[in-house]
Image (cartoon, rainbow, N blue to C red):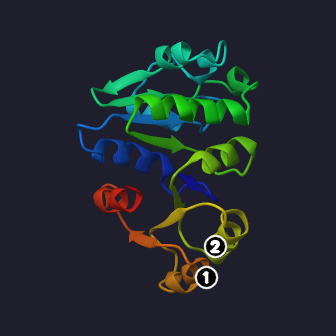
Amino acid sequence: MWSVKGGVGRTTLVKTLALTVPKDLKVLILDLNFQDGGSDLSYMLGLEAIPHVGMYLKSRTREAFEECLIEFRPNIYIMQAPPRLSLVENITPEDVKQMIEYGRALFDFIIIDLPNENNVLVRAALEASNKVLLLTKATPAEINRIRENCSRYDYVLVVVNPVSRMWRTFTDLLSAPAIEVKDLDAHAEEILKEVV
């Protein structure tokens, strides 16, 4: 789950999609949306501050990975972001890829909450992903950023409350599937069908 601009509902959609996945499938939410003060997802779900990704980074083993998972529901587990950036200052792109590999061995479905940045950690997660959901309001500036930064990824545009009725004119330049949504919760099943 990624966007080139903040405030489009990434974290809300992460939560909604996890709750929409059929209950017989095991889901991992990997929260890489690091920020001082804690993760929006952690607040949204009322999670305790520990365990978190920073604790996993102390040993980087599969056992540590499993110990740092939070069981949110019987089929939904979370590797949450830490409350402070200093706790993940030594994370590398290889760490991101390794966590995804551990997740693939344990879960049927992985949802990654990414910040609206284009850094080495974000690129590592995008490159390791089977499908990228790119949230946008489809402004011309966003579409240009998407065109410049996303051509090598397999992505679906989730156009959230587009700013213009002409949004399809802009998104047609990208040659990617696009879903228009006004309410992320109401369209969760439709969005999920695009990625599975």
Is residue 115 visible in the rendered image? The answer is: no
- Which disc, if any, is residue 173? 1
Find numbered disc 1 in the image and state the secondary structure of the residue it sits on.
helix
Residue 144 position, x and y percent, is 69, 73
| Front residue of this view, candidates 118 and 85 | 118
Residue 48 position, x and y percent, is 45, 19
Q: Is the C-beta separation of discs 2 and 1 under 8 Å?
A: yes
Question: To which residue does mark 2 refer?
Answer: 143
| Front residue of this view, candidates 151 and 15 | 151
At label 1, the amino acid type is: Leu
Could you tell me which residue is drawn at 53 percent across and 20 percent down?
Answer: 65
Q: In the rendered image, which quarter is residue 36 located in? A: top right
Residue 68 position, x and y percent, is 50, 17
> Compared with residue 64, is residue 82 higher up or lower down, i.e. above or below?
below
> Compared with residue 33, is residue 140 higher up or lower down, i.e. above or below?
below
Q: Is residue 35 left or right of residue 162?
A: right
